[in-house]
Image (cartoon, rainbow, N blue to C red):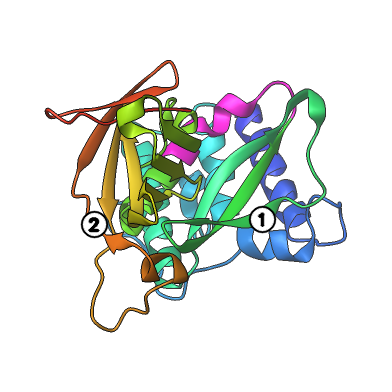
């Protein structure tokens, strides 16, 4: 019981601390606003009647859910209440998405410490995403891993983007055809999951661009769909547009080989 009281005191003091934009350079107003933002349509959940009296507060922000989920084992929550928290994490991700807040969470810290600015923005498949950062010392980051995985997987699904895996970063960069037959091929894979492809042939070239994903060592390319209302870029004005639909390459030791009886070969 004393353990639970201590943990609850820590949770409440941390929530108050997080809500004070002047308490630390890590908790500036913008960061505090993101942690404590209540989605407009988030309502009380009725999946089941919560068994623990500890979970009677308003679990309607990333900050509050993070802290309770982090200490779920210490608070000896029942399996039903743990499941409720997991559903609530997915629910808040969905309502944040509906409110136009595309948020993905990452962990920073360790030996290098945490940056003064604990959030930034980047683009994925032409979607602007907020990267919200959780600060950790050299130990303790494992407590948030499950929370982050549940939240991020739901947000990726809502954005219709496959989550990165341990191989994804190996695809970032530029690949070129590496023998005489494919010398004019250039493929650029950006970190925002967009790609550009050229097959240069003298003064002419074939060109396409779109979005990429990877499943372990396999790269999958899909061109964007052009309509009559699309403005042709300067690149397209001197190039022939081609389309890829689930075009697959196998990546091995920074070399790509086209699959499904394809012949193109590229290297980084």
Q: Residues within 10 Å of mark 1 (few under 14, many from 20)?
A: few
Assign the N terminus to one quadrant of the image: top right
At a point 42% along the width and 48% down the height, the residue shown is 193
- For residue 70, say whether it is visible: yes
Q: Which label sits on residue 76?
A: none
State the residue at coordinates (78%, 54%).
27
Left or right position of 242 against 1: left
Q: Which residue is mark 2?
A: 242
Q: How many marks?
A: 2
Where residue 72 appears, as percent x and y from the top left, is 50, 33
Answer whether residue 100 is magenta in the image.
no
- Give the side of residue 209 with respect to residue 175, left or right: left
As drawn, the residue found furthest toward the front would be 202
> Nearest the camera: 221 or 235?
235
Looking at the picture, tell me which residue is in the foreground, 42 or 260: 260
List the residue tagged with mark 1: 120
Going from N to C along the chain, the mark reached first, 1 or 2, is 1
Give the residues in magenta: 137-149
- Magenta span: predominant SS is helix
**Residue that appears at 86% across and 52% down:** 25
Measure the C-alpha gap from mark 1 to mark 2. 35 Å
- Is disc 2 placed on a helix, strand or loop? loop
Q: 187 or 253, which is in the foreground?
A: 187
Disc 1 is placed on an element classified as strand
User: Height in image: 232 above or below 223?
Assistant: below
Is 5 drawn above or below residue 101 in the view shown? above
| Residue 175 percent across, percent down from the top left | 45, 34
Residues marked 1 and 2 touching at CB (< 8 Å): no
Q: Is residue 89 left or right of residue 80?
A: right
Q: Is 8 or 178 nearer to us in this picture?
A: 178
What percent of the width, then of the height, locates residue 214? 33, 35
């Amino acid at each position: 019981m004393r353990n639970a009281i201590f943990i609850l005191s820590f949770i409440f003091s941390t929530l108050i601390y997080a809500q004070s934009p002047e308490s630390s350079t890590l908790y500036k107003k913008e960061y505090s606003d993101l942690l404590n933002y209540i989605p407009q349509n988030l309502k009380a959940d009725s999946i089941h009647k919560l068994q623990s009296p500890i979970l009677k507060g308003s679990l309607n922000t990333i900050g509050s859910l993070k802290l309770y989920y982090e200490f779920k084992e210490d608070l000896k929550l029942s399996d039903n209440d743990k499941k409720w928290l997991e559903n609530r994490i997915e629910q808040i991700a969905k309502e944040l998405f509906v409110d136009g807040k595309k948020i993905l969470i990452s962990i920073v810290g360790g030996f290098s410490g945490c940056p003064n600015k604990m959030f930034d923005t980047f683009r994925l498949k032409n979607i602007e995403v907020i990267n919200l950062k959780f600060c950790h010392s050299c130990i303790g980051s494992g407590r948030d891993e499950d929370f982050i995985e549940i939240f991020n997987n739901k947000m990726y699904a809502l954005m219709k983007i496959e989550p990165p895996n341990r191989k994804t970063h190996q695809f970032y960069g530029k690949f070129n055809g590496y023998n005489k037959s494919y010398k004019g091929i250039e493929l650029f894979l950006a970190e925002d999951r967009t790609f550009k492809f050229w097959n240069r042939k003298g003064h002419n070239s074939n060109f396409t661009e779109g979005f990429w994903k990877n499943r372990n060592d396999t790269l999958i390319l899909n061109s964007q769909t052009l309509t009559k209302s699309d403005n042709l870029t300067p690149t397209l004005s001197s190039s022939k547009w081609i389309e890829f639909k689930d075009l697959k390459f196998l990546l091995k030791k920074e070399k790509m080989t086209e699959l499904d009886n394809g012949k193109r070969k590229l290297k980084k």
